[in-house]
Image (tube, rainbow, N blue to C red):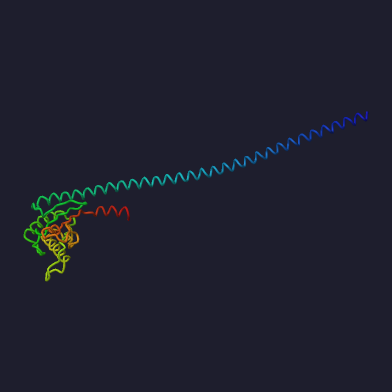
Amino acid sequence: MRKHVKTMALLILGAGLMTSCVSKKKYEALESQRMQLNQELDEAKSTISDLQSQNEEIQNRSAELERDLDDLNESMTQVQNTVKTVEKERNVAVDKIKTIKDEIDGVLMKDENIDLEEKDGKLYVTLGDDILYRFGSTRVSSTGKDVIDNVANILSNHPDVKVIIESHTDHRGLKEGAAYRDNWDLSVARSANVVRQMIKSGVSPEQLLAAGQAEFEPVVEGDNLSIEELAPNRRTEFIILPDVRPLISISESINP
């Protein structure tokens, strides 16, 4: 009997030990799974935090790009409006020159030594020196005064334009004892006399500028040319410029 009881006790103790051993392994497995899940959860939280930061950065950049796009659109609109304004003012200037050209063409005498040309937005009225002066002289002839007066009467009605009077000579030097030292003096003196005549005819002095080019802008060139062949070089040009102040104002508004 005592032997039987002892045997039963050993069996119960062994079963208890086996049960305790199995529960510990299961616990450790569960603990390992828990730790792994916690680690994965931490990694997931870190990833979510990184994604949220990236999303905020993207949203901020997107807002910045939208502001830049709005600024660009505004700048483009301003440029387009400026271009329209420039084109409008340019057309006004072109129309002004065409109007003056037609008016002057109507009063100029028909002469092969008178040329009327519109070029680069300016109007050139070119008179041979035989129309305005006697050979080598700076005194305006009676015929020259009539031509100048006719042109001046038109220009006085357009006070917004500027007029450059530019005289040219041929390359031959002046005779010894001449009233002028060289062709520079001669060309400037001729332009100044034309300007004085235009002022007498009603053109505002503020519209006028006298200039001389001597022989340095020839129409024809050659050392052996005759006086007659050099005639195109001896000329006075009325260079009529439109009022560009509106265009300058627009330019200054773009680049202050």
Question: How many marks are shown on the rendered structure?
Answer: 0
- Residue lying at 43% horizontally and 45% vertically, measured from the top left: 65
Q: Quadrant of the C terminus?
A: bottom left
Counting from the top left corner in percent of width and height, residue 144 is at: 8, 59
- Residue lying at 14% horizontally and 68% vertically, measured from the top left: 180
* 116 relative position to 23: left or right: left
Q: Is residue 115 visible?
A: yes
Closer to the camera in the image, 117 or 100? 117
Counting from the top left corner in percent of width and height, residue 219 is at: 17, 57
Counting from the top left corner in percent of width and height, residue 122 is at: 19, 53
Residue 222 picture quarter: bottom left
- Residue lying at 46% horizontally and 45% vertically, measured from the top left: 61
Q: Quadrant of the N terminus?
A: top right
Counting from the top left corner in percent of width and height, residue 150 is at: 9, 55
Closer to the camera in the image, 238 or 83? 238
Closer to the camera in the image, 137 or 97? 137
* 217 relative position to 133: left or right: right
* 208 relative position to 51: left or right: left
Residue ranking furthest to the front: 224
- Residue lying at 11% horizontally and 50% vertically, measured from the top left: 105
Q: Is residue 160 visible?
A: no
Closer to the camera in the image, 248 or 98? 98
Residue ranking furthest to the left: 142
